[in-house]
Amino acid sequence: MVSLAYFLYTCYFRYWFTVLSEHSPDLVDKAVASEGGTDDAKRRGDAFARAFSAHLARLMEEPTAYGKLGLTNLL
């Protein structure tokens, strides 16, 4: 039973990692556009994209990096 629970837990977070990773570029594009598409907005959008990508990568490698892993940790 424990292995099934772990498998479901892993699948659940893998799903959310995938969703967040795939939609991050769209989120950044919308945020930059909402700020007028200025050079500063693009710079901040790029910085966010790099930081968020690194955050997700760290959690995929080390799920307990920030404590108990939950959906709120992903966001």
Image (cartoon, rainbow, N blue to C red):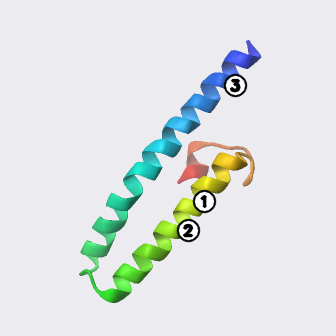
Q: Is residue 49 left or right of residue 68?
A: left
Tell me which label, 3 or 1, sits earlier in the chain: 3
Circle 3 SS class: helix
Residue 15 higher or lower than 46, as above or below: above
Q: For mark 3, what is the residue?
A: 6
Residue 61, given in percent of the width and then of the height, sits at: 69, 48
The amino acid on which the numbered mark 3 sits, given as a three-letter code, is Tyr
Q: For mark 1, what is the residue?
A: 55
Residue furthest top as drawn: 1
Residue 65 higher or lower than 13, as above or below: below
Marks 3 and 2 sit apart, C-alpha to C-alpha, by 28 Å
Marks 1 and 2 sit apart, C-alpha to C-alpha, by 6 Å
Q: Is residue 46 left or right of residue 60?
A: left
The amino acid on which the numbered mark 1 sits, given as a three-letter code, is His
Residue 47 higher or lower than 52, as above or below: below
The amino acid on which the numbered mark 2 sits, given as a three-letter code, is Ala
Q: For mark 2, what is the residue?
A: 51
